[in-house]
Image (cartoon, rainbow, N blue to C red):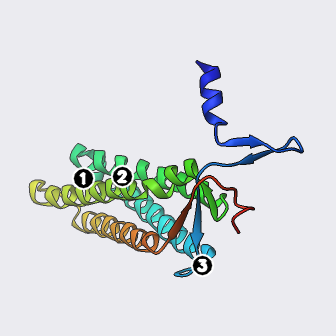
Amino acid sequence: MKEKEKKDRYADYRKNADGSYEYTGVLYRYDDSMISWKKALTRLWTCTGACVLLETAAGCIPATGMVRTLYVLIPYIIGYCVTLYLCYKMIELSFSDKDLKEKIYDKTCGSFGAVTLVIKVMLAAGAAGEILRLFLETETKLTASLTVTGLLAMAFLMVYLFEQAESLMKFDRIEGKTAENNK
């Protein structure tokens, strides 16, 4: 089984005449016509970093719902973990070249939509749970609850801005050629 996995992993590489290996699989080349690669990554990182900071700040506030209410805590924790997963994907994208191998493209840009959707749903559920908690609990900390709801709403906005910045990134699919041969 391991031998088959090893062959599959290296299926897109061919040995040159000089003995070195070259990638011959599908590449996704970034198109700089709308926005430069560096500027696109800067925008994505700004939104991702702001989202992590806002969610972290929301988790540090001792609002009634964030302390002991599962219908607030569970969406918050899931959303926070998925946001950290988005950071991992951003690190992987940042250390890649403008010419992304198909596997890297699918792991990063190809799945941003699903990841951001989960984050937005969890942020909205956490904020809605915190607001619901305000009406159900008699001894609520109004200021803390509204602050948490506001921070989660701002994190939601950052995810939306991330999606907008990501939509400006255009990639051209190049099949069966190396980056050096097709520049």
**Which label lies toward us, 3 or 1?**
3
User: Residue 120 occupies which quadrant of the picture?
Assistant: bottom left
Residue beneath label 3, please?
Answer: 36
Looking at the image, which residue is at 65% across and 42% down?
Answer: 12
The Cα–Cα distance between marks 3 and 1, rounded to whole angstroms, is: 42 Å
Say which of 158 and 106 sits in front.
Answer: 106
The Cα–Cα distance between marks 2 and 1, rounded to whole angstroms, is: 16 Å
Looking at the image, which residue is at 10% across and 54% down?
Answer: 136
> What amino acid is found at the position of numbered circle 2 in the picture?
Gly
Percent x, y for residue 131? 18, 61
Is 142 situated above or below 70? below
Q: Residues within 10 Å of mark 3 (few under 14, many from 20)?
A: some
Query: Please, what secondary structure does the residue beneath circle 1 have?
Result: helix
Say which of 118 and 3 sits in front.
Answer: 3
Question: Which of pointers 2 and 1 lies earlier in the amino acid sequence?
Answer: 1
**Which label lies toward us, 2 or 3?**
3
The quadrant the N terminus occupies is top right
Residue beneath label 1, please?
Answer: 65
Percent x, y for residue 6? 65, 28
Residue beneath label 2, please?
Answer: 79
State if disc 1 and disc 3 touch (CB < 8 Å).
Answer: no
Position of residue 127 in the picture relative to residue 83 (left or right): left
Is 34 situated above or below 129? below
